[in-house]
Image (cartoon, grey):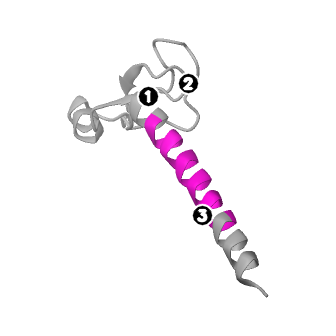
Amino acid sequence: MFDEKPSPEDMQRFDQGDAFCPHCGGEVSDLADICPHCGLFMHGGATRRSPADQWFRQRWIILMVILLALLLSGLISFLAFLKP
């Protein structure tokens, strides 16, 4: 009979190390389907970024959008001031 399951060597070769659950931030294997910490299915898969990195990245993007909006509104105000 033909066995189609991956061998332990294959599992080690394809396992890229630990990742993080997108729901609770717990450390999980990148091959896990269910988080052992919160028990939720990881439909989108595990993420390589730690929860702290994700939090910082989200705040950084929000800060950049706010700064861009302020610069744009300042430029519009300045151009309106220069208009005779």
Marks 2 and 1, the one that precedes in the sequence: 2
Spatial CA span between label 3 and label 2:
35 Å
SS for callout 3:
helix
Rendered residue at 58%/19% (across/down) = 40
**Amino acid type, label 3:** Leu
Residue 45 position in % (x across, y down): 50, 36
Q: Position of residue 55 (x, y in %)?
A: 48, 33
Give the spatial CA distance, label 3 vs label 1.
30 Å
Taking the spot 42% from the left edge, 19% from the top edge, the residue there is: 26
Residue type, mark 2 in image: His
Say if 79 sits above or below 72 in the image.
below
Q: Nearer the viewer, residue 68 or 21?
A: 68
Proximity of marks 3 and 1: CB atoms separated by less than 8 Å: no
What segment carries the magenta color? 56-73
Mainly helix, strand or loop, the magenta region?
helix
Residue 39 appears in view: yes
Type of the residue with mark 1? Pro
The residue at which mark 3 appears reads as 71
Q: Is residue 10 left or right of residue 61?
A: left
Mark 2 burial class by Cα count in 10 Å: few <14, some 14-19, many 20+: some
The circle on residue 51 is 1
Furthest-right residue in view?
84
Residues 3 and 24: in front is 24
Q: Earlier in the sequence, mark 3 or mark 2?
A: 2
Between 58 and 40, the residue placed more toward the observer is: 58
Question: Dot 3 surroundings within 10 Å: few (below 14), some, or many (20 or more)?
Answer: few
Q: Quadrant of the C terminus?
A: bottom right
Q: Quadrant of residue 10?
A: top left
Q: Name the residue that disc number 2 marks.
A: 23
